[in-house]
């Protein structure tokens, strides 16, 4: 007997639109979408065959009652939506950063535990094939003792001063700028592969100080670029560099060097099957990195559609598969709300460090 399709409601249709094909590819029924711009929401719903459209998330939760709720709104709304969705018995997949602060994230973790629901953070960049292979090699001990690692996430979205601002420029809505947008993924990849970050030193900047938040009420106050030096619990050093004003760049990289080997990962959003990524390795007396063969592990249809659709089918769909398995088995799959909270704790420390210009210990309580 085929498994019954889970019903899904998606709140926020910016990046949230990528979740529609991701869940549909896993056999789920997306029954409702929600966005303040109702006309735009209706157009998206028509495109993907979603039957119900809502302007307010409270109404969507009350009337559509989806079994799974996807939260893809600005972060200042994450906690309120998650707490209400969990209280109604829904499982929750929340976009990153999980919340505005560690305390908000902890409230979400505790609410999920009380409800007994599956709650995951959408750290979708764990799931490209090359990232998965890198993680497996680290787990197998390929690196030996890690000495240092360097991670970058660079995009060009606001490299041009004339590009209109969005809520992402407003710390009151976003909580963080480039670190919440991009850097939180690097924090997660660091934790997932190499262990906990215990202290950070950060410097950040705004590309164009003349830019204001939407509506012009105040200057943009969320960082466009940030450089972080971090120390792990193991003693290894890690550097993180993020920018959403990197003209000509649209890529993620991770390099790790240890006592037995080294790994180099790169994912550029260009070319066919870009979502697979590229992995190279060096070990023993090797003088140079050599390619590591990495099967894509996805149907060719994952590469069909626009950039958001491909991102959804290629990087979110594997996470959704794990999410659904957790529901079916009564397990708590990773990346969990707990993972989101741990990453949020590092973001809090980065924000404090950038403000004070000093090393800051990461709260591990």
Image: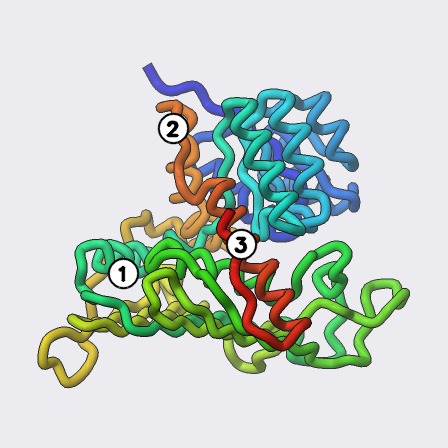
Residue depicted at x 70% and y 57%:
174
Structural crowding at the residue carrying mark 3, measured as other residues with C-alpha within 10 Å and reported as few (<14), some (14–19) or many (≥20): some
Occupied quadrant, residue 165? bottom right
Q: Do tag 3 and tag 2 residues touch (Cβ < 8 Å)?
A: no
Q: Position of residue 123 (x, y in %)?
A: 47, 51
Occupied quadrant, residue 38? top right
Rounded to the nearest angstrom, the CA distance separating label 1 from label 2 is 25 Å
Structural crowding at the residue carrying mark 2, measured as other residues with C-alpha within 10 Å and reported as few (<14), some (14–19) or many (≥20): some
Residue depicted at x 51% and y 26%:
117
Q: Do tag 3 and tag 1 residues touch (Cβ < 8 Å)?
A: no
Q: Do tag 1 and tag 2 residues touch (Cβ < 8 Å)?
A: no
Structural crowding at the residue carrying mark 1, measured as other residues with C-alpha within 10 Å and reported as few (<14), some (14–19) or many (≥20): many
Question: Which structural element holds mark 1?
Answer: helix
Q: Which residue is mark 1?
A: 134
Residue depicted at x 65% and y 31%:
83
Q: Position of residue 304 (x, y in %)?
A: 44, 54
Question: Which structural element holds mark 2?
Answer: loop
Of tags 3 and 2, which is closer to the observer? 3
Q: Position of residue 279 (x, y in %)?
A: 27, 68
Q: Which residue is mark 3?
A: 363
Query: Furthest-right residue in view?
Result: 217
Residue depicted at x 55% and y 54%:
345
Marked residue nearer the N-terminal end (3 or 2): 2
Q: Which residue is mark 2?
A: 331
Q: Nearer the viewer, residue 148 or 265?
A: 148
Give the side of residue 112 with respect to residue 35, left or right.
left
Q: Position of residue 320 (x, y in %)?
A: 44, 39
Occupied quadrant, residue 63? top right
Please state, as top left, top right, bottom left or bottom right, where the N terminus lies in the image.
Answer: top left
Q: Nearer the viewer, residue 164 or 240?
A: 240
Q: Is residue 307 visible?
A: no
């Amino acid at each position: 007997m085929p498994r019954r399709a889970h019903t899904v409601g998606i709140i926020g249709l910016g990046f949230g639109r990528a979740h529609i094909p991701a869940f549909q590819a896993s056999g789920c029924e997306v029954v409702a979408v929600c966005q303040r711009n109702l006309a735009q929401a209706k157009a998206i719903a028509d495109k993907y065959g979603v039957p119900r459209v809502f302007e307010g998330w409270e109404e969507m939760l009350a009337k559509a009652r989806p079994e799974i709720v996807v939260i893809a709104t600005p972060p200042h709304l994450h906690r309120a939506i998650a707490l209400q969705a969990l209280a109604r018995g829904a499982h929750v997949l929340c976009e990153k950063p999980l919340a505005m602060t560690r305390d908000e994230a902890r409230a979400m973790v505790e609410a999920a535990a009380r409800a007994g629901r599956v709650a995951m953070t959408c750290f979708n960049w764990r799931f490209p094939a090359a990232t998965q292979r890198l993680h497996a090699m680290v787990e197998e001990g390929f690196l030996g003792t890690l000495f240092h690692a360097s991670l970058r996430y660079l995009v060009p979205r606001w490299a041009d001063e004339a590009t209109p601002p969005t809520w992402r420029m407003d710390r009151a809505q976003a909580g963080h700028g480039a670190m919440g947008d991009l850097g939180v993924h690097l924090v997660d990849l660091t934790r997932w592969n190499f262990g906990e970050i215990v202290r950070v030193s950060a410097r950040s900047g705004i590309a164009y100080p003349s830019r204001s938040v939407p509506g012009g009420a105040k200057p943009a106050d969320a960082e466009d670029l940030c450089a972080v030096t971090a120390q792990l619990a193991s003693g290894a050093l890690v550097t993180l560099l993020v920018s959403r004003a990197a003209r000509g760049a649209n890529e993620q990289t991770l390099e790790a060097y240890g006592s037995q080997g080294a790994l180099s990962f790169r994912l550029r959003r260009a070319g066919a099957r870009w979502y697979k990524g590229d992995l190279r390795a060096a070990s023993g007396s090797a003088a140079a990195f050599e390619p590591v063969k990495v099967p894509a592990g996805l149907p060719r249809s994952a590469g069909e559609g626009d950039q958001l659709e491909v991102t959804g089918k290629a990087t979110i769909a594997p996470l959704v598969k794990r999410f659904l398995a957790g529901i079916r088995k009564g397990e708590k799959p990773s990346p969990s709300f707990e993972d989101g909270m741990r990453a949020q704790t590092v973001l809090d420390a980065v924000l404090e460090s950038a403000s004070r210009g000093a090393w800051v210990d990461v709260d591990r309580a």
